Image (spheres, coloured by chain):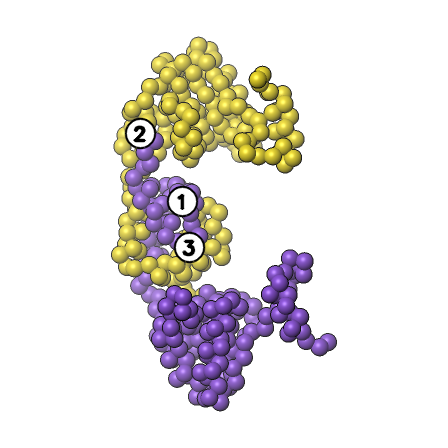
Chain colours: A yellow, B purple
Amino acid sequence: MKEIKSIAALANRFSALPGVGKKTALRYAYAVIDLSEQEVDAFCAALKDVKNNVRFCSVCGNFTEGDVCDICASRSCKQICVVAYPKDVLAIEKSGAFGGVYHVLHGTLSPMDDRTPDDLNIKSLIRRLSDAEEVIVATNPDVEGEATAIYLARLIKPFGVKVSRIAQGISMGSELEYADAVTLGQALGRRTEL
Amino acid sequence: MKEIKSIAALANRFSALPGVGKKTALRYAYAVIDLSEQEVDAFCAALKDVKNNVRFCSVCGNFTEGDVCDICASRSCKQICVVAYPKDVLAIEKSGAFGGVYHVLHGTLSPMDDRTPDDLNIKSLIRRLSDAEEVIVATNPDVEGEATAIYLARLIKPFGVKVSRIAQGISMGSELEYADAVTLGQALGRRTEL
């Protein structure tokens, strides 16, 4: 059976989304047939709205629909939490454990992929340091995230601003038995007194 | 942090797709920001094309862009394979094990959900029987699929057409150890001589 052309074309579009393989894309495309015409129109409008309305906050680099994002506009910037991507902001906000502002680098340093400090949103971070007391580096605990954290610490400390790194250790709810060796080693090495 | 309105709206649209939860929908919406304007336009066009061009084949009820689908137009209709949904046609076609035509019911009988024979694409199946030699019922081996198969067998046999059901048993590559009791029971009961 030849696949139906317009379904194959739509599936192809869906497969551009992260983590969507051929089978899932086809499943999504078939589901679109069951949507009403109004729903399809609304879907298109929503796609275009995101593309047209969403831009980067001129202060922190996070996504926003205005010039400055809601967080930058409303919070004290004594504590700046540096993250690699906008989705990391969302994750930290959901935890409810941080009340300061963010700074989104849009990537991490990676000599392998030829990503240097000039490719990241770092210059505007330096400009924000005059009002800051602490910069918390919340990049992922992998090689690139660590390298980025070390680079930022060296860069920022001369400005007299404290630089800290999110803690690493065993995740809440996980089991020691299944933790990898590096994580276990760090959890032991960075143990805290009770 | 308030979520960005247009991103939340798009995520809402994505979550209407099958198997897409809130987190995945948000991930898709964020990915759209990284698409180019042309790609977003093409995405919209593909969505509308599917909605506007795809209809049901007037013979078998499968999806098609013309009046009669490619399969109905090109194959002998001596053997008709009855399936519940268009995606089942795709699955059987991929196996390459069937060279006849299909008939798509668009559902299965389900007294619980108030789906009666009148809600399924059965009348047009009866009209096709004059040329047919065998009807193979390939609905899922669950309660509704079995009920539908039994109903169709009773309906079709008086027309002098052979009615068969796809075989049930242990799947190729699966392990007996993990097979459920009903499947194992049927695999034993329907054993074939070597």
Q: Amino acid at mark 3?
A: Pro
**Pick the front one: B168 or A55:** B168
Question: Is B168 situated above or below A171?
Answer: below
Q: Horizontal and vertical percent for residue B116?
A: 38, 73
Q: Position of residue B84 (x, y in %)?
A: 45, 69
Please report the residue visible at 51 percent of the width from the left and 30 percent of the height from the top: A140
Task: For the residues labelled 1 and 3, say whether their Cβ atoms are less than 8 Å apart.
Answer: no
Tell me the CA gap for discs 1 and 3.
Answer: 12 Å
Q: Quadrant of the C terminus of chain A?
A: top right
Residue corresponding to mark 1: B22
Q: Chain of mark 2?
A: A
* Residue B162 drawn above or below residue A141: below
Looking at this view, name the residue that lies furthest to the front: B112
How far across and how far down the image is residue A92, in percent? 43, 30
How much space separates mark 3 and mark 2, taking CA atoms? 32 Å
Question: How packed is label 2: few (under 14 Cα within 10 Å), some, or many (20 or more)?
Answer: many
B177, above or below A2, in the image: above
Report which residue position mark 3 lands on.
Answer: B18
Q: Amino acid at mark 2?
A: Cys
Q: Amino acid at mark 1?
A: Lys
Residue at 39% of width from left, 77% of height from top? B122
In the rendered structure, the answer to whether residue A106 lies left or right of residue A142 reads: left
Q: Tell me the distance, in whole angstroms, between the alpha carbons under discs 1 and 2.
A: 23 Å
**Numbered circle sitting on residue A69:** 2
- Marks 1,2: beta carbons within 8 A: no
Residue B102 in view of the camera: no
Q: Nearer the viewer, mark 3 or mark 2?
A: 3
SS class, disc 3: loop
